[in-house]
Amino acid sequence: MSTDPFGLFDAWFAEAQESEPNDPNAMVLATADASGRPAARMVLLKGHGPDGFVFYTNRESRKAHDLKQNMQAALLFHWKSLRRQIRIEGVVERVSDAESDAYFASRGRDSQLGAWASEQSRPLAARSIFEGRFDAMQFRFEGTDVPRPPHWGGYRVVPDRIEFWQDRAHRLHERRLFTREEAGWTEGLLYP
């Protein structure tokens, strides 16, 4: 068994990429606003390592407003086919512009245009308005590279707790909790 939470994450994530039929990088992102009101939604993991777990979004979205008020978040991966989950908690920091630019450049062109067209988390009177914005972005950037919108970028959850949960018979599940201390990571076993 690994005593390194990032090595163990890498092993479990690799297995999920082999077994999960859709989006093995899908994770629940939970935030809370300044008053403590929680919100959760699915996002996609786009980078990870010992420095944290990265996702990208419109920085004018509800999740971004929550993070501006409360730079703490929780992530949850659930891989049903493997009967495993990983819970991650920690502080959140913005990804650098250079890192956001590099990831944005790797996206498909239509996804890039969609980032310009979307006013995420804001109501629209009709879907046709959004589709019209998308068409306008196609025209605006026709024949040129699509730059990253200034309101779009990444966030990194820097973990201080990572819990690995494995289903076991008779609900005698296995839970391994890694906690960041000043000297490094400590591990403890939890029971259901």
Image: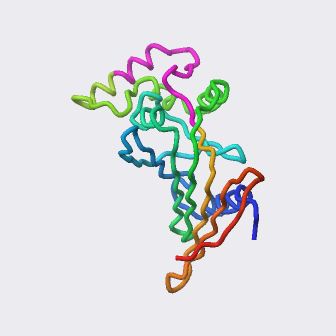
> Where's residue 151, x and y in %?
48, 23
Residue, far front: 182
Q: Which residues are magenta?
A: 133-155
> Vertical placement of 163 versus 134: above or below?
below
Taking the magenta stretch, the answer to whether it contains residue 39 is no
State the residue lying farthest toward the bottom.
Answer: 170
Q: Residue at x 64, y 58 (%)?
A: 13
State the residue lying farthest toward the left.
125
Q: Is residue 14 left or right of residue 184?
A: left
Please give the name of the residue rendered at 45% of the width and 20% of the height, measured from the top-left corner: 138
Residue 31, located in which quarter of the rendered image? Answer: top left
In the image, residue 23 lies at what x, y percent?
53, 53
In the displayed structure image, the side of residue 40 where residue 4 appears, left or right = right
Q: In the rendering, at what x and y percent does residue 83 appear?
A: 54, 71
Asked whether 83 or 52 is in front, the reply is 52
Q: Is residue 118 above or below residue 143?
A: below
Residue 135 screen position, x and y as percent: 38, 21
